[in-house]
Image (cartoon, rainbow, N blue to C red):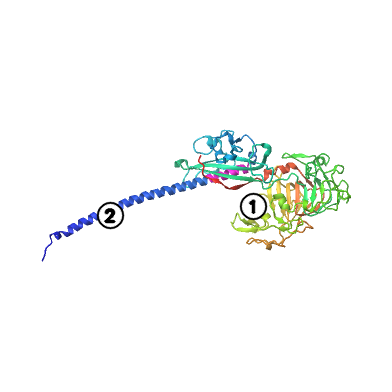
Amino acid sequence: MTKHPALRHPPRQVRGNALLVAVILLLLASVITLLTLNVGLFEQRTSGNDARAKLISEVAEAGIAQGAEFFRLQPGLLKPGGHWERCNTLAADEFPCGSVDVSRRDTMYFWKNTTAVGDLNQDGVEDVLDERMLPLTDVVPAAGMVGAVGNFNKVSYGVGVVLCRVKIPSASTDPTECTTVAAEQSTTYVYNYVAVASLPDEGGTRTTVSQMLGQYLLFQPNLNQPPIMASGSVDVTGGLQVVTNPNGGGAGVPVSVWTRRDISKTGTPNTCYLDEFYRFGAKNNAPPTLEEGVAVCDTCGCNGDVSLSYDKSGNKQDEGIDILDIDGSNGSNGLGVNADVLPQEFPCDLFEYVFGVKARIDTNGDYFCETLAPSVTYTSPTTNAVVYLDADEAFLYKNAQSIIPRDATATSLMKPSQALSVAYPNKAINGIVWCQTNCNIGSNMEIGSPSKPVLLVIDGAARIQGRVFGLILMRTPPATPAAHPLTAAHNHAGVDLLDPATGGTATLDMNAGAVVYGAVVVQGQINKANGTAAIVFNGDVFKNFSNSIKPTNSNLPGAWTDRLSY
């Protein structure tokens, strides 16, 4: 039997090798663990930085939204004044003018506070940024200001703005330009908001976001608006008094009634200028008074000897230069001073005439828009459901300040803020108001006010016996609901057409005691306007629509950036 000396102590050597391997494995495991911890810490830091960046970016976006509200609620601040300074007084990269393109920078303005405002952005330092940031707390309640976000209990943010006063174009092909010449400035504005936000307790967590917005008016008051306008016939009886728009047909050319059909008169209605209405028409020792800076007189009237039209009682149709209708007149045959209104001279679609949104189209070339325009999609603000609506209804659901709904379906398409907080009608109701049902205005009732008029859109028929300050639009609602489903595009071919003989199905009646300071536009007929009712065009009321209908902001495509740093 052969003996091997190398195998005398095998267990001890094996144990030594195993120990060495174990030590090496432990060392490798330790190294891997350390490397893994380092990667984990890196990923944790990265994700933390990413989370902070997203949070602070959202704060900056909130600041831009609040900046837009600052001017939407205070449009008067957009006018030239001490708060606005030219960007050409700053260096090219200074806050906030460095956010706009150098080619138009010198024709723009930036906001600068005229009084000491302190640390507006709450970053612990009063500096030049605070001087050029909007005092958001003037319009945003304390609860609406962002003081904390996520797990961070201290947030700093502020918003500066660069304003472009858009130049009135000389031709339709002119580009959009900014101007500093007052005579060339329109009422359209474009602003570039620059929001700076940070987390003061998190070192370098800071961001700058810039967004350009445009502003447009939902309703542009037409100072040439006739006091009475109808796509159908107009019947004035009794003692209706109409105060003309002295510049309705151009400078110095009065227009009291404009219709694409005929106006018929019985009794003793009159039309006259506002001065004659107030000066010679005061009755019962009740002269004009001032309400909120606007002259009113509910009991005044047009005396026959100073009337523009209808200075004789009875059925004699003695129409003056302020009546535009169709009665076979050529201007010299005794049927009217003016020749007949031509079809192409009267607005084809009265909703478009008032709001600039086409609701109906002319499909047969007679210059009368009888067919509903294609339906559009609309997202319900309460259910987020995407539905199909007629173009005029979609516009009103989106933009009306208040809505009186016809049923539960209509309510589901409204914003909660559009529900009236007071009973209809009420003097406190102003802005764009859409009344879908029960729209009469009774005796001694009032809607709108001289300083905050109402643009009242009424579906169907209504009777007025009270006071109205503003503009009334009588709309013809669809008569066939089944042809206007919410779930599919509408087929308007041959459905709910307007009859050119009547102009529509909306009808307006005015009885004794009714006074409209403004104008009425009827997509249909004025059936009866009698008693001592009056429609008084007042330019001051129309100008005050800027107090009750706020402008709307719209994002401009490609105008968002976070490339800046302030």
| Amino acid on which disc 1 is placed | Lys
Does the magenta run of residues contain 69? yes
Q: Residues within 10 Å of mark 1 (few under 14, many from 20)?
A: some
Q: Is label 1 in a helix, a strand or a loop?
A: helix
| Magenta part, dominant SS | helix
- In the visual, does 144 lie left or right of 465? left
Q: Position of residue 336 (x, y in %)?
A: 86, 49
Does the magenta run of residues contain 110? no
Q: Residue at x 86, y 44 (%)?
A: 304
Where residue 17 sits, quadrant-wise, is bottom left
Which-is-in-front pick, marks 1 and 2?
2
Marks 1 and 2, how far apart at CA: 70 Å
Q: Residue at x 71, y 48 (%)?
A: 455
Can you identify the residue that label 2 sits on?
25
How many badges with numbers are in the image?
2
Q: Nearer the viewer, residue 107 or 408?
A: 107
| Amino acid on which disc 2 is placed | Leu
Can you identify the residue that label 1 sits on?
398
Direction left: furthest residue: 1
Q: Which residues are magenta?
A: 60-74
Q: Residue at x 59, y 44 (%)?
A: 68
Q: Quadrant of the N terminus?
A: bottom left
Q: Position of residue 4 (x, y in %)?
A: 13, 61
